Structure formats: structure tokens, C-alpha cells
Image (tube, rainbow, N blue to C red):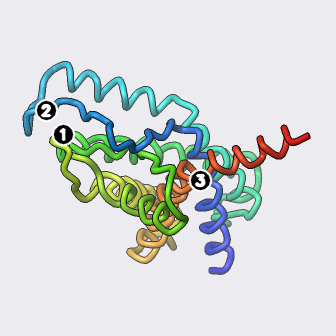
Amino acid sequence: MLKTASVLCLITLTGGGVCLAQETPVPATAGQTEAAPAAPGASTPQNSQAHKKSFLKRAFSVEAVTATIPGAVLQQFHDWPEEWGKQRLGFEKRVASLYGQFVIGVAIEDTVKAVHHEDTTYRRLGQGNFFRRTAHVITDTVTARKPNGNRTMAFSLPANAYGSWAIATLWSPHEFRNPQSIFEWGSAGMGVSAGANFAREFWPDIKEVFRKKKNKP
């Protein structure tokens, strides 16, 4: 149990870091103009093709690598799950499991986004005190924008986190095929999303501090 908890924490922390490079945060400026609202429920062949291209792009991207390899290495180091062993075959199983979970999660997330018309792109606040910006991170993680500019619950992210792990239990050792495991690892997935947005919000400030120190005479 302790090993499971430590692997869960490590993967959550690592995921928050590697996700930083997956997309460029969009600044939330006061004068930002929104795209013209799409007709609710509108579905065109162009939209379907765009969703298909987006899915394929994510399935074979740097994001797919960062979502798979670091976690597989951590699991291999901690020999988790033990049933898969520490040999090469065990590592291959871990990579295949995490990649399969990633692809399934992307498919679920994209489907929910298309049906519910969600835009979950993170928009960096970039100003204000730590607590205000942290509240913005939380808000922009658990909510999404509709085509008309209104806010809605971001159902696509928990659908990805909990749904992908629920399906992954089908090929995981039997001990993980239970609601508690789905809740724990789904919550870890949500933690990765929040951690990535937290990094997107504050990492530019940290880089600026190091840059000033480096250029200081």
C-alpha cells in the first residue's frame, strides 16, 4: 500500500512537470476577443475531420511520450505493480499500459469536449498575488469555456482521468480492479492536470527570476 501511494505521488508530481511543455498557455487579457460563437450542437464534416486530426496528432506527439515514459520508468524503478516484474517484459507492459491509457483518455476527453462544447485551454493570469493566481489555476482546471464565452464544468478532464483508469484496470492486476483504485488514480490524473496548469501559471515568473540573476553584473 505504501509503495502504491509513493508511486502515485511521484507520478502526479512528475506529470505536472512534463505536461508543462505540452501546450503554450494563453494569457487571459482583459481586451482579449473571443472567437465568434458556434451554433449550439453544430456538427460539420470539417469539425469531425478536425477532431480526428487533433486526436491523431495527440496520439503520436511529445505529449504521448511525456505521458508514458516517465511514469513507466518510475513504475519500473519501484517494481509496481509487482506482478509485472522488473525485467524488460515488465517495462514493456508498463509502457504499453500507460500509452493505452493515454490514448483512451484522449479519445474520451475529445468526445466529451465535442458533445459538451468545452474549451479547456489554460489561460494564464500572470498578475496578482499568489492566492488570487492559485484560485485562477483551480477555476481554469475545473471549468471550461463554452462557444458563447460562458463558463461550464469541465466534464472532459475528469472523464479522461477516471474513465481511462477504469478501462486500464481491465488489463491491470486483479487487485486494482475496484472503485477505490479507480478513485485514487483518477484523482492522481486530475492532480496532474492541476499541477500542469499551476506550472504554466508560475513557471514564466521563475524563469524570469533566474534570467535576471544570470544577467546581473
Tell us which disc is closer to us: 1 or 3. 3
Q: Which residue lies most toward the right here?
A: 217
Which of disc 2 and disc 1 is earlier in sequence?
2
Q: Quadrant of the C terminus?
A: top right
Residue matched to label 3: 202
Q: Is residue 217 left or right of residue 7?
A: right
Q: Is residue 207 left or right of residue 195?
A: right
* Residue type highlighted by circle 3: Phe
Question: Are discs 1 and 2 less than 8 Å apart at CB?
Answer: yes
Residue matched to label 1: 147
Q: Is residue 18 above or below residue 179?
A: above
**Residue 169 visible (yes or no):** no
What residue appears at the point 51 percent right and 73 percent down from the top-left corner? Answer: 175
**How far apart are the two marked residues, 1 and 2, measured between alpha carbons?**
6 Å
Residue matched to label 2: 38
Other-residue count near label 3 (Cα within 10 Å), few / some / many at <14 / 14–19 / ≥20 = some
69 or 80, nearer to the observer: 69
Q: Is residue 202 left or right of residue 183?
A: right
